[in-house]
Image: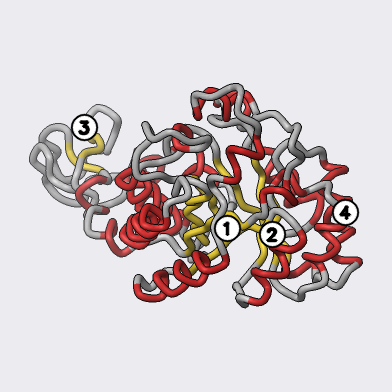
Amino acid sequence: MTKTLIIAEAGVNHNGDIQLAKKLIDAAAEAGVDYVKFQTFKSKKLVSKNAEKASYQKENTGDSSESQLKMLQKLELSEADHLDLISYCKTKNIKFLSTAFDLESIDFLNKLNIDLFKVPSGELTNYPYLEKIGSLGKPIIISTGMATMEDIESAINVVTKNGASLNDITILHCNTEYPTPMHDVNLKAMQTIAKKFNVPIGYSDHTLGIEIPTAAVALGAIVIEKHFTLDKTLTGPDHKASLEPDELKNMVTAIRHIEKALGHGRKEPTQSELKNKDIARKSIVASKTISKGDILTEDNITTKRPGNGISAMEWPNIIGTTAKKDYLEDDLI
């Protein structure tokens, strides 16, 4: 059984409040995910002062006049916050992860010795960013929202040219709309990516609910990333397209069930069902009284449960033979 790596994306759903961030860690640990992931950035290095918010950000923050810079400055975690959250994760037995959005933040996370680096969809076409990520010698997970196959190929080329091994790269199919409409999910593209680039694949989900990430596991995803929040009604850019704690727990349970259910691929009876074999299958039985010496025909034999006699699959071999004894109705032949 392959264990799916489940990343609970807290992102900026802490709203700049370190205590809220810790409650998010509590919820992720309770749900049983592998990693809780935040976002690391210096707002002024990430976005220009003139950049507008995305339409979903304007709607979810309730302020269309505020710049993207002003919004992000309120959501920025300090270096001290990172150390505090990493320490807190250890007490909760859950792994800490964060996505860097600028070169300085990559260096900072590397100093913190995090397990792996996550390239967000928005940085997929950022050459200097990919160059630095590729040089770190760490496993890399790459999200591909808004991407073409050519974009993905270019990104893989940049990170591998700068030292990353293809064996250490996992590509996540993704759609960068919050929430993603079902008709735009295109889960089959995940398998297209796997075939084209011969890499492990996963799925970063922005749909509402848990059906799509669960289905992604059934289709071969080995990494699932999903936004979560303590309360979808909180003000902030990502809360509405996030799972609440109970939903996150349900998603983890569903994924773990799918992992077990996928099985080994061989079609054979299982131990749990063998006890039902004789009960469910049918044998050849007398449909009326039969005397010794009678010819067995479709008029005097039939098939009924249980299956502990001559198998009903032997029907053509039994028709036309002679009864070796007397039979009453329903007696096994």
Identify residue type, mark 3: Asn
Work out how far the residue at label 4 is from the one at label 1, CA to CA, in angstroms.
Answer: 26 Å
> Which residue is painted at 68% across and 73% down in the image?
110
10 Å crowding of disc 2: few (<14), some (14-19), many (20+): many
Label 1 element class? loop
Which mark is on residue 222? 1
Q: Look at the numbered discs 1 and 2 and tell me whether their residues touch, using CB distance below 8 Å.
A: yes
Instruction: Classify residue 162 by image quadrant.
Output: bottom right
Which mark is on residue 300? 3
Closer-to-camera residue (278/154): 154
> Which residue is painted at 40% across and 44% down in the image?
229
Q: Look at the numbered discs 2 and 4 and tell me whether their residues touch, using CB distance below 8 Å.
A: no
Q: Nearer the viewer, mark 2 or mark 3?
A: 2
Circle 4 residue:
127
Identify residue type, mark 4: Tyr
Circle 2 residue:
170
